[in-house]
Amino acid sequence: MNQDPPADLSHAGAIVDKAIEYMMGQQLDPVAIASALLGGSLGLLARSMEDHAIEQVLQNALGSLRSGELRAEWGQPQV
């Protein structure tokens, strides 16, 4: 089974990574960066998906947080 993300996801992720790198280089607060990205992401989801689908995306994110998967992906201990 192929575990590679779709090309569009990889491309979008690379662009977001570069934007984060740029903002960090501008000495912006990491919480401000994350909040802006999250707000923009939620706005895009609201324009692209039904509410129940957005809720499922958010439930999946909470599941990753609660299981420790989110921090493990970045090599950080669970707090």
Image (spheres, helix red, strand yellow):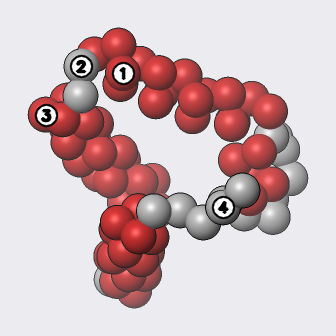
Q: Secondary structure at mark 1?
A: helix
Task: Please name the residue that numbered disc 2 is placed on.
Answer: 50
Q: Quadrant of residue 26?
A: bottom left
**Measured from the top left, where is residue 79 in percent x and y?**
81, 41
**Measured from the top left, where is residue 53 in percent x and y?**
36, 21
Task: Please name the residue that numbered disc 4 is placed on.
Answer: 2
Q: Residues within 10 Å of mark 1 (few under 14, many from 20)?
A: few
Residue type pointed to by label 4: Asn
**Measured from the top left, where is residue 5 in percent x and y?**
53, 62
Residue 75 visible in this rendered orientation of the protein: yes
The reply to whether the C-beta atoms of the residues labelled 3 and 2 are less than 8 Å apart is no
Residue type pointed to by label 3: Arg
In this view of the protein, which residue sits in the foreground, 20 or 63?
A: 63
Q: Residues within 10 Å of mark 4 (few under 14, many from 20)?
A: few
The reply to whether the C-beta atoms of the residues labelled 4 and 2 are less than 8 Å apart is no
Q: Quadrant of residue 42?
A: top left
Of label 1 and label 4, which has the lower sequence position? 4
- For the point 80% across and 40% down, the residue is 68
Task: Please name the residue that numbered disc 3 is placed on.
Answer: 47
- For the point 80% across and 54% down, the residue is 72
The reply to whether the C-beta atoms of the residues labelled 2 and 1 are less than 8 Å apart is yes
Of label 3 and label 1, which has the lower sequence position? 3
Q: CA distance from mark 1 to mark 4?
A: 24 Å
Q: CA distance from mark 4 to mark 3?
A: 30 Å
- For the point 60% across and 66% down, the residue is 4
In this view of the protein, which residue sits in the foreground, 10 or 59?
A: 10
